C-alpha cells in the first residue's frame, strides 16, 4: 500500500493536477502524452525536475551510477583526459548534473591524472539540484571549485572539449502510440469518467504517422502494440552540441538499438516511472513527484547525430566502456583492502549484465575529432545501430 504523502507534497501534487486538468481542457479534452510529460517533469515551479522533490540517492526516487560508486566518475575522467589531451586542452560540459557527484568525482580524478579542463560547465534546469550541486562542489579544493560554472542554456559561443550526459536522454518527452486494427493511433491523456487522469488513444496527426512510418517497424507487430518515440531528440541534440567546435559528446543511458527496441517482446513500450526507489509504469500516479522516463532508441540518437553534423565514434554496453576506461585498474589502485573490497562490489553493480552492465549503453558523438577513444577499445557495437 502506498503511504500517505507529506502535506507539502500533497499540496504540490494538487497544484500540478489542477494545471494538468486546465491544459487538458484547453486542448479540447485530450492532451498528447509528450505535452503531459513536458508539464509533469519541467513545468516551472511544479514539474518534477523544476521543483524540490528529493530525487537522487538514498531516500530519493532513484539511484544513478555516480551515486553507486566513485569508480564511474573516475572512468569518465579518464575519457575526458583523453579527449582534452588529444585536443590540446578544452572544457567539460555536463548536462543535467544530478547531485553533483559525477562532477565532483570527474574533477578530482582529472586533477590526479594531471589534466584539468579550463572550465567545468554544468547545464542544469532544476533549481534545487543546482543548489545541491553548489553545496557539494564547494567542498572541492579551491583550484578545482573555481573551474565550475552553471549555465541556463547551452553555450552560445564556440568551445572545445568533452560533453557528458548521464541519464539525460531518457527524460526527454516522448510521443506514445498504439496499433489499432492495423493502423497507428496516438496515445494521449484525458480526465476519465471517474475524474482521474488516464489514457485514451486518438487519431494520430500526419506528422506522427510519418514519424512512426520512418521507423520501418516490423509488419508482424501485434494488435494493441504500444511504444514511444522521441521527436524532440533531433532538435535537442543539435542545440546542445551546436557550439561544440571540436570534441566528443558522450551519452550514457538505458536503451537499445531500434531493431531490438521495437519488438513484440516489448509490446507495452518502455515507459517507466520512479518514486521512492520503486519503479512502476503509471505516469499518472504521482505527477510532479515522480520521474517519468522512456528507454532510448540509440538508432535515433545516431540519426540525430548525423542531422547535427556529428560523427559516431563508438557505441557499446556500459560493461565494455568501463572496462575500456580502466575500471579494473581503478580498483587495483585502491590503497587499503576494505575499500578495495567495497569498490569491487560496487563494480559488480556497474558491470554485471543482470545489474547495469548491459542495460546501459555508451554512445560517443564527435565533431572534428579523430583520436581513438579508450571507452570503445574493448567493445564497439556500432554495426548494431
Image: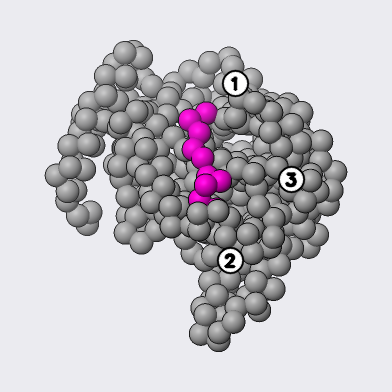
Secondary structure of residue under mark 1: helix
Q: CA distance from mark 1 to mark 2?
A: 43 Å
Residue at the spot x=59%, y=17% of the render? 207
Residue at the spot x=75%, y=54% of the render? 82
Nearer to me, 287 or 259:
287
- Quarter of the image containing the C terminus? top right
Nearer to me, 97 or 27:
97
Name the residue carrying label 2.
71
Asked whether the viewer can see residue 169, the reply is yes
Neighbour tally class for label 1: few under 14, some 14-19, many 20 plus, Cα within 10 Å: some
Residue 275, image x and y in percent? Answer: 34, 50
Tell me which corner region of the image, top left, top right, bottom left or bottom right, holds residue 219. Answer: top right
Residue at the spot x=34%, y=55% of the render? 60
Neighbour tally class for label 3: few under 14, some 14-19, many 20 plus, Cα within 10 Å: some
Residue 382, image x and y in percent? Answer: 78, 47
Name the residue carrying label 3.
89
Question: Which stretch did the figure color magenta?
Answer: 144-153
Nearer to me, 203 or 261:
261
In magenta segment, residue 145: yes
Name the residue carrying label 1.
209
Sequence-wise, the earlier of marks 3 and 2 is: 2
In the figure, 86 relative to 67: above or below? above
Q: CA distance from mark 3 to mark 2?
A: 24 Å
Q: CA distance from mark 3 to mark 1?
A: 45 Å
Asked if the residues shown at circle 3 and circle 2 are in contact, with their CB atoms under 8 angstroms apart, the answer is no
Amino acid at each position: 500500500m502506498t503511504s500517505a504523502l507529506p502535506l507539502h507534497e500533497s499540496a504540490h501534487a494538487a497544484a500540478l493536477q489542477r494545471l494538468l486538468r486546465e491544459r487538458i481542457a484547453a486542448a479540447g479534452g485530450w492532451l498528447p502524452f509528450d505535452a503531459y510529460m513536458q508539464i509533469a517533469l519541467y513545468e516551472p515551479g511544479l514539474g518534477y525536475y523544476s521543483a524540490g522533490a528529493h530525487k537522487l540517492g538514498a531516500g530519493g526516487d532513484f539511484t544513478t551510477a555516480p551515486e553507486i560508486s566513485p569508480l564511474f566518475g573516475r572512468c569518465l575522467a579518464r575519457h575526458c583526459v583523453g579527449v582534452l589531451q588529444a585536443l590540446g586542452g578544452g572544457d567539460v560540459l555536463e548536462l543535467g548534473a544530478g547531485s553533483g557527484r559525477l562532477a565532483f568525482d570527474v574533477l578530482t580524478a582529472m586533477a590526479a591524472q594531471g589534466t584539468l579542463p579550463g572550465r567545468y560547465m554544468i547545464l542544469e534546469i532544476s533549481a534545487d539540484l543546482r543548489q545541491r550541486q553548489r553545496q557539494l562542489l564547494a567542498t572541492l579544493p579551491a583550484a578545482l571549485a573555481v573551474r565550475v560554472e552553471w549555465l541556463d542554456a547551452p553555450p552560445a559561443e564556440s568551445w572545445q572539449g568533452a560533453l557528458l550526459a548521464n541519464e539525460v536522454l531518457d527524460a526527454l518527452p516522448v510521443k506514445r502510440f498504439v496499433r489499432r486494427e492495423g493502423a497507428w493511433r496516438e496515445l494521449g491523456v484525458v480526465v476519465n469518467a471517474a475524474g482521474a487522469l488516464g489514457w485514451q488513444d486518438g487519431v494520430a496527426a500526419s506528422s506522427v504517422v510519418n514519424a512512426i512510418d520512418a521507423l520501418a517497424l516490423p509488419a508482424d507487430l501485434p494488435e494493441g502494440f504500444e511504444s514511444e518515440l522521441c521527436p524532440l531528440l533531433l532538435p535537442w541534440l543539435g542545440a546542445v552540441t551546436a557550439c561544440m567546435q571540436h570534441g566528443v559528446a558522450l551519452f550514457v543511458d538505458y536503451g537499445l538499438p531500434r531493431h531490438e527496441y521495437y519488438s513484440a517482446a516489448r509490446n507495452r513500450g518502455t515507459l517507466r516511472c520512479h518514486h521512492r526507489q520503486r519503479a512502476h509504469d503509471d505516469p499518472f500516479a504521482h505527477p510532479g513527484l515522480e520521474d517519468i522516463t522512456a528507454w532510448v532508441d540509440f538508432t535515433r540518437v545516431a540519426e540525430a547525430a548525423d542531422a547535427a553534423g556529428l560523427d559516431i565514434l563508438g557505441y557499446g554496453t556500459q560493461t565494455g566502456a568501463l572496462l575500456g576506461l580502466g575500471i579494473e585498474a581503478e580498483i587495483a589502485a585502491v590503497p587499503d583492502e576494505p575499500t578495495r573490497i567495497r569498490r569491487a562490489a560496487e563494480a559488480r553493480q556497474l558491470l554485471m549484465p543482470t545489474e547495469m552492465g548491459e542495460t546501459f549503453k555508451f554512445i560517443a558523438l564527435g565533431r572534428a575529432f579523430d583520436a581513438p577513444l579508450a571507452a570503445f577499445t574493448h567493445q564497439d557495437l556500432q554495426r548494431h545501430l
